[in-house]
C-alpha cells in the first residue's frame, strides 16, 4: 500500500513538473507592428493560469543581410526578464513610438545605435518589415514572424494582405493559445486560415490589449481598449438602450469568473435593473478581488450639428431648428453627427415631397430596442423664387438636374453673369468645379447658385459649355 502511495506521489510530482514546464514555454507573440522606427512594437501574451518567469525567454532578430537565427548578431538579441501575470501581456516598444503605445510599454527599445542608451533602454531592431523575429525559450524557438532563411527577403504577406509586416499592425486571433514555429502556416493565405488579423496601417489602439486576456468575450458587444492612464483599461460599447444587467451578462462568455455591475456611485446593480452609461462591469478573481474593470457605454441617440440648433435631448423629444426649407435629406444628414451603433431616418409629413425637409418632419434615431424623435423646424417657405432666365443661354428646369446650356467656349465669368437674370429678390454666384484652371472662365461642370435674400432657399444650376470652336473662328453671341 505504501509503495502504491509513493508511486502515485511520484507520478503527481512528474505531472506537475510537466505542467509547469509547459506553462513556462507558453508565451507567444500576440501583436506586432514594424517597418518604421516610430511604429515598432511587440506584444507577448501569457495564456496560462500561472505566473510566468520570463527568465529564459529571448527575442532574436535576423536582419536582411543574415540568414538563420544561429547567425544573428548578439546585438539583435534581447533577453526578457521579470514575471508576467496570468492572462496579461508584456509589451516592448521603440522609444519613439506614439504616446499611446509608450503608455503601456513594459520595456523601451532604442533604435539609433549611435545614441548611448539609458540603463532602462535596450538596443534591438525590426524596422524594415523584412526582418525575421523569433521568440525563444531556453534556446528553443517558440514563435516566429518571418522566414529567417529566406533570401533575398522582402516584407511578408499575411492573411492575404500584401507586405503586411511592413507598417501594418498584426493581431493574433483570440482563439490562438500558443506560438507557431511554422511561419507559412501562421501567416496563412487569407483571413480565414491565418492566425493573424491585419488590423490596419499603423493601428495603435490594440497595444497592451489582447482580446483573450480580459477573460471575457462577446459576439454581441464591442470590447475596446482604453489608455493605461484612464480609470478603466477597457470599455464595452454597442449596448442597446433598456438592457438589463442579466441581459448584459447573457451576451458574454466569462470563462467561469465571477462578475458584477456597479453604478456610478459604486453600488451593485440588481440583475433586473437597467444598465446606464457610466456603470462598470467588474470581473473578479477566485478570491473576490477585481481582476478587470470595464466601463459600460450605452448607444447614444444624441445628435449634434454646427449648422443647426439642437435641443431637448434630456426630454421626451428633441428639436432641430434652423434648417432651410426644402433642404434635401442628403444635405440635411451631412450637417449632423451621430454616435456609433445607431440608425436614423427622416419621416416626412403627409403631402410633402419625400427627400425634402420641411417643418413637421421627424428625425428618428434608433437601435434595436428604442427610438428617440427630433421634431424638425425649417426657416419657412422661401420669400422669393429661385428661378433664372436668360436671353442668351438655354435654362432647363424641372428635371433631376437644372442646367444652363449654350455657353460659348472661354466665356468670362463676369460676362456670363451679366447674361443671366435671377428672380426678383434673389442673387446668384458661380462656383467652379474640381480641377478648374486658374483663368476666370466658365467650363463645363461649374455651378451657378441662385439664393433668395433671406437665404430660405437655394437652387443649383449645372453649367455646360460648347465645344472649343475651330481655330480663327471668332466668338459671337446670337
Image: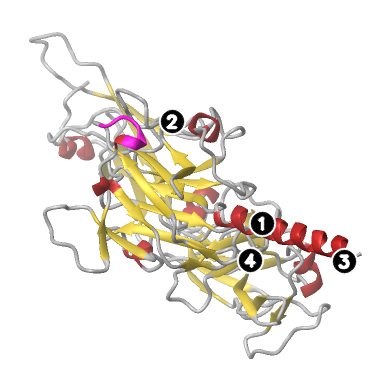
Name the residue tied to disc 4.
299
Q: Are marks 3 and 2 in contact (CB under 8 Å)?
A: no
Q: Tell which circle, 4 or 1, labels the residue nearer the N-terminal end.
A: 1
Looking at the rendered image, the disc whose residue lies closer to the viewer, 2 or 4, is 2
For the point 59% across and 63% down, the residue is 87
Q: Residues within 10 Å of mark 1 (few under 14, many from 20)?
A: few
Which residue is at the far right?
1
In the image, which residues are magenta?
A: 66-70
Q: CA distance from mark 4 to mark 1?
A: 44 Å
Q: CA distance from mark 1 to mark 3?
A: 26 Å
Residue 2, which numbered label? 3
Left or right: 423 as drawn, with respect to 256: left
Expressed as whole percent of the image width and height from the top left, the position of residue 46 reads 55, 59
Q: Tell which circle, 1 or 2, labels the residue nearer the N-terminal end.
A: 1
| Residue 387 is a magenta residue | no
Residue 157, which numbered label? 2
Q: Tell which circle, 3 or 4, labels the residue nearer the N-terminal end.
A: 3
Which residue is at the far left?
472
Rendered-image quadrant of the N terminus: bottom right
For the point 13% across and 61% down, the residue is 116
Any part of residue 199 in sight = no
Q: Residues within 10 Å of mark 3 (few under 14, many from 20)?
A: few
Name the residue tied to disc 1.
19
Mark 3 element type: helix
Expressed as whole percent of the image width and height from the top left, the position of residue 360 reads 64, 64
Left or right: 276 as drawn, with respect to 120: right
Q: CA distance from mark 3 to mark 2?
A: 60 Å
Residue 394 or residue 47, whichever sits in front: 47
Expressed as whole percent of the image width and height from the top left, the position of residue 210 reads 54, 57
Looking at the rendered image, the disc whose residue lies closer to the viewer, 3 or 4, is 3
Mark 4 element type: loop
| Residue 68 is a magenta residue | yes
Amino acid at each position: 500500500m505504501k509503495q502504491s502511495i509513493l508511486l502515485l506521489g511520484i507520478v503527481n510530482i512528474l505531472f506537475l513538473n510537466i505542467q509547469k514546464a509547459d506553462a513556462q514555454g507558453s508565451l507567444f507573440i500576440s501583436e506586432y507592428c514594424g517597418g518604421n522606427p516610430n511604429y515598432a512594437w511587440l506584444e507577448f501574451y501569457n495564456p496560462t493560469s500561472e505566473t510566468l518567469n520570463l527568465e529564459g525567454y529571448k527575442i532574436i532578430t535576423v536582419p536582411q543581410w543574415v540568414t538563420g537565427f544561429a547567425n544573428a548578431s548578439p546585438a539583435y538579441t534581447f533577453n526578457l526578464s521579470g514575471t508576467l501575470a496570468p492572462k496579461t501581456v508584456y509589451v516592448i516598444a521603440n522609444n519613439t513610438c506614439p504616446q499611446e503605445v509608450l503608455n503601456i510599454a513594459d520595456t523601451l527599445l532604442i533604435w539609433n545605435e549611435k545614441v548611448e542608451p539609458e540603463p532602462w533602454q535596450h538596443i534591438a531592431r525590426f524596422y524594415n518589415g523584412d526582418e525575421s523575429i523569433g521568440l525563444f525559450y531556453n534556446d528553443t524557438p517558440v514563435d516566429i514572424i518571418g522566414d529567417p532563411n529566406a533570401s533575398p527577403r522582402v516584407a511578408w504577406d499575411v492573411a492575404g494582405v500584401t507586405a503586411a509586416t511592413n507598417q501594418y499592425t498584426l493581431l493574433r486571433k483570440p482563439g490562438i493559445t500558443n506560438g507557431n514555429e511554422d511561419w507559412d502556416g501562421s501567416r496563412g493565405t487569407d483571413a480565414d486560415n491565418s492566425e493573424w488579423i491585419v488590423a490596419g496601417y499603423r493601428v495603435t489602439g490594440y497595444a497592451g490589449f489582447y482580446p483573450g486576456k480580459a477573460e471575457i468575450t462577446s459576439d454581441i458587444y464591442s470590447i475596446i481598449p482604453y489608455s493605461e492612464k484612464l480609470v478603466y483599461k477597457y470599455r464595452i460599447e454597442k449596448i442597446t438602450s433598456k438592457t438589463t444587467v442579466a441581459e448584459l451578462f447573457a451576451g458574454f462568455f466569462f470563462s467561469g469568473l465571477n462578475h458584477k455591475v456597479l453604478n456610478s456611485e459604486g453600488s451593485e446593480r440588481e440583475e433586473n435593473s437597467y444598465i446606464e452609461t457610466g456603470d462598470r462591469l467588474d470581473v473578479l478573481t477566485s478570491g473576490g478581488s477585481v481582476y478587470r474593470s470595464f466601463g459600460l457605454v450605452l448607444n447614444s441617440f444624441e445628435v449634434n450639428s454646427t449648422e443647426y440648433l439642437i435641443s431637448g435631448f434630456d426630454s421626451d423629444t428633441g428639436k432641430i431648428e434652423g434648417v432651410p426649407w426644402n433642404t434635401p435629406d442628403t444635405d440635411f444628414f451631412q450637417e449632423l453627427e451621430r454616435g456609433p451603433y445607431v440608425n436614423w431616418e427622416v419621416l416626412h409629413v403627409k403631402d410633402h415631397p419625400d427627400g425634402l425637409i420641411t417643418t413637421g418632419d421627424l428625425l428618428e434615431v434608433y437601435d434595436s430596442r428604442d427610438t428617440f424623435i427630433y421634431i424638425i423646424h425649417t426657416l419657412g417657405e422661401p420669400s422669393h423664387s429661385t428661378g433664372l432666365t436668360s436671353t442668351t443661354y438655354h435654362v432647363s428646369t424641372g428635371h433631376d438636374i437644372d442646367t444652363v446650356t449654350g455657353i460659348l467656349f472661354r466665356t468670362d465669368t463676369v460676362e456670363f453673369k451679366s447674361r443671366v437674370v435671377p428672380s426678383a429678390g434673389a442673387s446668384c454666384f458661380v462656383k467652379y468645379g474640381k480641377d478648374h484652371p486658374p483663368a476666370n472662365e466658365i467650363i463645363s461642370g461649374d455651378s451657378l447658385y441662385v439664393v433668395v435674400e433671406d437665404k430660405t432657399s437655394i437652387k443649383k444650376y449645372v453649367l455646360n459649355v460648347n465645344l472649343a470652336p475651330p481655330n480663327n473662328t471668332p466668338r459671337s453671341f446670337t
